[in-house]
Amino acid sequence: MAKEKGEIKILAENRKARYDYSIIESLECGIELVGTEVKSLKTGRFSFTDSYARIKEGELFLVGFHITPYPFGNLFNHDPDRERRLLVHKQEIKRLKRKTDEKGYTLIPLKIYLKKGYVKLEIGIAVGKKMHDKREAIKERDQKRDLQREMRSRV
C-alpha cells in the first residue's frame, strides 16, 4: 500500500460490537498512549474484548482495552489494562454525556486505525440489540450471501 497524504490504515474493526449493538452515531477521537503502546498497536497486539468508553470528571476514558506489552520493550513497559484517555473536544464530551445518560446507551470502540501517523479510535454511541434483532441480522446476511452465490453461478 502506497503512502499518501490522507492514508488511513485500519488496524482492527470491532465486528462483534456491530453484531451486539445498534450503532446510532460514531465519532473519531485520538487516544493518549505511552511508550511502547504504539509499537504494540502497530503489530496488532491488542484486544477489543469487553472494552467501552466512559466519562469521568469531564474527560473521556477507554476502559478494558488490552494492549499487550511490547516484547522488545524495556523495564518501563506499559500496564496492559490501564484506562486510556481519549482526546475529544469538551463540547463533544458534553454531548456524549447527555446521550449516554439516557437509558440503554453506551460508548463502545468500533475501530482503531492509523491516520497520518497518529493512532485514532472510532467510538460509537450504541444501544444493545435484542435476540430477535440479532436473528434478523443473521437471516439478512445469509440471504445476501445466497443471492451473491446465485449471481456468480449465473455468470
Image (cartoon, rainbow, N blue to C red):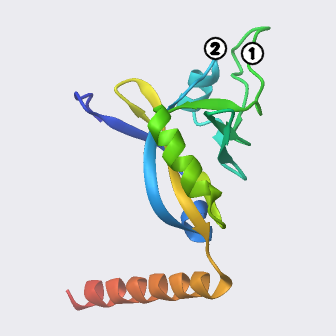
Q: Residue 35 has which mark? A: 2
Q: How crowded is mark 1: few (under 14 residues within 10 Å), some or many (20 or more)?
A: some
Q: How crowded is mark 2: few (under 14 residues within 10 Å), some or many (20 or more)?
A: few
Q: Which residue lies furthest to the left in this view?
A: 155
Query: Which image quarter holds the C terminus?
Result: bottom left
Q: Is residue 119 visible?
A: yes
For image coordinates 62% across by 63% down, the residue present is 102
Query: Which image quarter holds the N terminus?
Result: top left
Disc 1 marks which amino acid? Asn
Residue 7, position in %: x, y? 29, 34
Question: Contact, CB < 8 Å: mark 1 with mark 2?
Answer: yes
Label 2: element kind:
loop
Does 119 appear above or below 125? above
Question: Marks 1 and 2, Cα distance to the nearest angstrom?
Answer: 7 Å
Label 1: element kind:
loop
Question: Could you say which quadrant of the image residue 132 lies in?
Answer: bottom right
Please indicate whether residue 26 sits to the left or right of residue 94 in the image. Answer: left
First in residue order: circle 1 vs circle 2 = 2
Q: Can residue 15 be seen in this view?
A: no
Question: Could you say which quadrant of the image residue 151 lies in?
Answer: bottom left
Q: Between residue 69 and residue 153, name the one nearer to us.
A: 69
Q: Residue 77 has which mark? A: 1
Residue 9, position in %: x, y? 39, 38
Question: Could you say which quadrant of the image residue 3 lies in?
Answer: top left
Residue 56, position in %: x, y? 69, 37
Does 3 appear above or below 65? above
Residue 107, position in %: x, y? 60, 52
Disc 2 marks which amino acid? Gly
For image coordinates 60% across by 22% down, the residue present is 33
